[in-house]
Image (cartoon, rainbow, N blue to C red):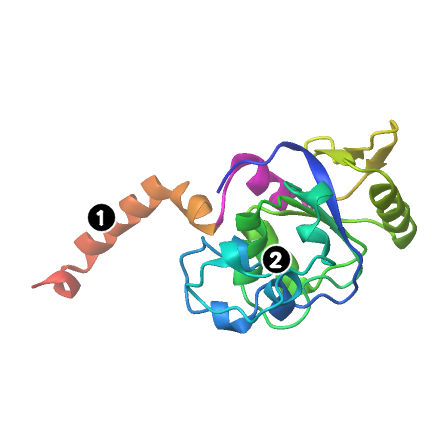
Amino acid sequence: MDKFVRKQGLVAPLDRSNVDTDLIIPKQFLKSIKRTGFGPNLFDELRYLDEGFPGQDCSNRPLNPEFVLNQARYQGASILLTRENFGCGSSREHAPWALEDFGFRVIIAPSFADIFFNNAFKNGLLLITLDDATVERLMTDVEQTPGYRLDVDLVGQCIHTPDGETIEFDVDAFRKYCLENGLDDIGLTLQQADAIRTFETRYKADNPWLFRS
């Protein structure tokens, strides 16, 4: 996965609590396990006025003009600001796949569902938990200021706002290390490739009867 050190991006506000994984990426799109191509169907039931299905060309589907991600001012947003308990519901890894494929790298909320929280970090998303009052203030600023952008510094664990405010956030040291180095579970395992090869060679030598053709 791509390394994450710092992200300066446009912010989109999803002013909604308890957004579950079926709303993030509906169940009919879970047949694929390619990890890519889910962006057009992110928040499918909210973004479009018709019913979506796998393999559909979304370019000509009728858009819901009321949904925030369809509004011109939020096109190209890479930071999602939302409410508490984001990512609740079933434990589908397709949810972070869809968010990242759409273009989001940072999600800010007062709280996240545990399984989604773990899945998101493993797929290169930075999830930032801030208190309700700070999220409320940011939500107001975003909605009142077209082109509102934030500067998210993972190394310094802080967010810089357009008016010069610095907001600090906590992040687990191991998750931070993985994001900074672009390491998912496979990447972490491959760091031990030499040790794995050494073990395999020794194991085959010690147990030759297991490898007779």
Classify 10 Å Cα crowding around label 1: few (below 14), some (14-19), many (20 and above).
few
Q: Secondary structure at mark 1?
A: helix
Q: Are marks 1 and 2 in contact (CB under 8 Å)?
A: no
Q: Residue furthest left?
A: 213
| Residue 65 to residue 29: above or below | above
The image shows residue 19 at horizontal and vertical percentages of 71, 65
Q: Which mark is residue 118?
A: 2
Magenta run includes residue 85? no
Amino acid at circle 1: Thr
Q: Which mark is residue 201?
A: 1
Q: Residue at x 56, y 69 (%)?
A: 26
| Residue 78 to residue 113: above or below | above
The answer to whether residue 100 is left or right of residue 56 is right
Residue 122 visible (yes or no): yes
Magenta run includes residue 175? yes
Classify 10 Å Cα crowding around label 2: few (below 14), some (14-19), many (20 and above).
some
- Specify the segment rendered in magenta: 172-184
